[in-house]
Image: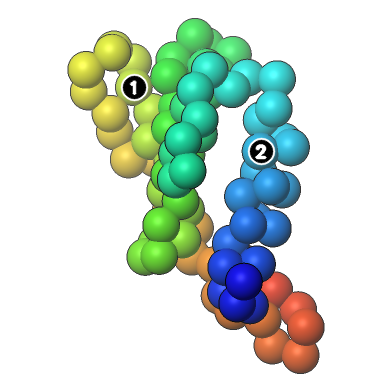
């Protein structure tokens, strides 16, 4: 596993720990949760942007909420 893969796995694991109790579905690049308002939220992991968050008030339409760019490490430190 290269450094970038390890970093992506670490970020995914960190986010998964935060939302663990709300996860309704999970794939290799997507975690789907139900938020406290009962809406479906997708957290998508990809290369650009690193993380995208989308919310759906219905079951068929998702709206982009925000995106997070994950940068490589510099001197062993990860930047988000």
Q: Furthest-right residue in view?
A: 76
Measuring 21% from the left and 17% from the top, which residue is drawn there? 60
Measuring 32% from the left and 40% from the top, which residue is drawn there? 64
Q: Furthest-front residue in view?
A: 1
Measuring 47% from the left and 43% from the top, which residue is drawn there? 28
What quarter of the picture does the N terminus occupy?
A: bottom right
Residue nearer the viewer, 5 or 65: 5
Q: Given contact means CB atoms under 8 Å apart, are the residues at marks 1 and 2 in contact?
A: no
Crowding at mark 2 (Cα within 10 Å: few <14, some 14-19, many 20+): some
Residue nearer the viewer, 13 or 38: 13
Residue nearer the viewer, 8 or 38: 8
Q: Which residue is label 1 attached to? A: 56
Percent x, y of residue 72: 59, 79
Percent x, y of residue 33: 52, 23
Colour scheme in use? rainbow
Q: Which residue is label 2 attached to? A: 16
Percent x, y of residue 43: 47, 39
Label disc, if present, on residue 3 of the rendered structure: none
**Left-right relation of 63 to 2:** left
Q: Along the polypeptide, which appears first: circle 1 or circle 2?
A: 2
Crowding at mark 1 (Cα within 10 Å: few <14, some 14-19, many 20+): some
As measured in the structure, the alpha-carbon distance from the residue carrying label 1 to the one carrying label 2 is 19 Å
């Amino acid at each position: 596993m290269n450094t970038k893969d390890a970093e992506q796995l670490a970020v995914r694991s960190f986010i998964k720990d935060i939302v663990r109790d709300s996860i309704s579905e999970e794939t290799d690049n997507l975690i789907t949760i139900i938020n406290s308002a009962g809406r479906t939220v997708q957290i998508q992991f990809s290369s650009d942007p690193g993380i995208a968050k989308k919310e759906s008030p219905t079951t068929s339409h998702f709206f982009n909420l925000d995106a997070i760019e994950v940068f490589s490490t510099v001197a062993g430190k990860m930047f988000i």
